[in-house]
Image (tube, grey):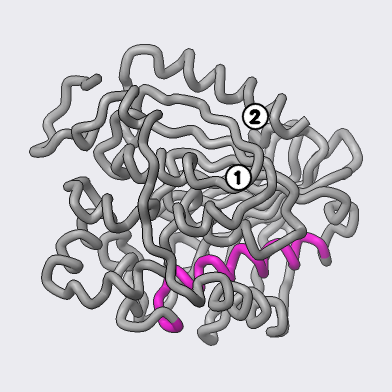
Amino acid sequence: MSLPHSCPFDPTGGYSPEELLALRPVIEEPADFAAFWRATFAEALAAPLDWSIKPSAHPGNADHVVFDIEFAGLLGNRIGGWLTQPRNVPVTRGLLIGHGYGGRDAPDLAPPVADAATIQPVCTGLPTRSLHTGIPSQGGEHVLHGIDRRETYVHRHSVMDLWRAASVLHEAVPASRSRLDYLGGSFGGGIGALALPWDDRIRSAYLCVPSFGNHPLRLQLPCNGSGEAFRLLAQKRPELRSVLSYFDAALAARHITIPVLVAAAAFDPSVPPAGQYSVYHSLGGPKELFQLTAGHFDGYPGQSREDLEIRTALARFFA
């Protein structure tokens, strides 16, 4: 399928919906992939959180009150974000909510469940709450920061930010410990996939148009934004592919055993659809697929209907 567009490339990546459903990723996994991530998880949880919380200038809404939160990153930086609590019902669970590559300038006040406290961190170096000297905030530059080594790559710190945010939520709102789920889209979908296998506090997850899946394939597919920055640099410096292999969301998905709902698009100018479907197909546990017509592309026919359907699916999935 295709939609009218002005991109100088095919946002389907040349795959039909049927071909995306039939895709079976073939990706070589580094021998120490799991060991690297387990060590990273241990490092993230061992460092002091040094967290703080205060009432936010954000007014919230009729259903949610908002707090500003901060905690220590692992680069000598501070990670900012928001914590929300329901106004009208007791907290019985927690939600860890990721964001896209544009960062976040306000909290999401429409979680799919009413009784959750949410924590919504902004990952290292990104606007508006976690800008950091020396780390570019624009997606196409941020995605390349520290990429020479797996230990210094900024996506490693982004994953650690999620784990540490979950710890802050549990300390700030003890009732959230009873159940923790994850939601993330685009950047947050890919970073979430990297985070999920190693943290057994998370019970289930929703990944929407997840990025960073199947690097060997996606590096062959032109796109917009951060993915294209990846692709062009890898052409000049093919040795970086060995670093990227540790940050492949589809490889991480093999190790995910909790239930996951994936919303994947057949047409997406920013995240190649084949990469999204590679994450879904690679999942190692119970999984559900919501087939979106398009991602990162507003105004297509049927979008409002799909938005409503996915909200309904999320309420059921997280019930």
**Which region of the structure is painted magenta?**
151-170
Name the side, left or right, on which 107 lies relative to 238.
right
Seen in the picture, residue 266 relative to 238 is either above or below; the reply is above
Seen in the picture, residue 229 relative to 222 is either above or below; the reply is below
Q: Which mark is residue 314?
A: 2
Q: In the image, what residue type sits under mark 2? A: Leu
Label whose residue precedes the other's in the sequence (1 or 2): 1
Q: Which of 310 and 203 is in front in this view?
A: 203
Reading the image, the residue beneath label 1 is 183
Q: Can residue 57 be seen in this view?
A: no
Q: In the image, what residue type sits under mark 1? A: Leu
Q: Position of residue 278 (x, y in %)?
A: 41, 44
Q: For the residues labelled 1 and 2, say whether their Cβ atoms are less than 8 Å apart.
A: yes
Please identify the quadrant where the N terminus is shown: top left
Please identify the quadrant where the C terminus is shown: top right
Quadrant of the rendered structure where residue 287 is? Answer: top right
Q: Position of residue 108 (x, y in %)?
A: 59, 42
Q: How many marks?
A: 2
Residue drawn at point x = 45 percent, y = 83 percent: 151
Residue drawn at point x = 47 percent, y = 40 percent: 281
How many residues crowd mark 2 within 10 Å: few (<14), some (14–19), many (20+)?
Answer: some
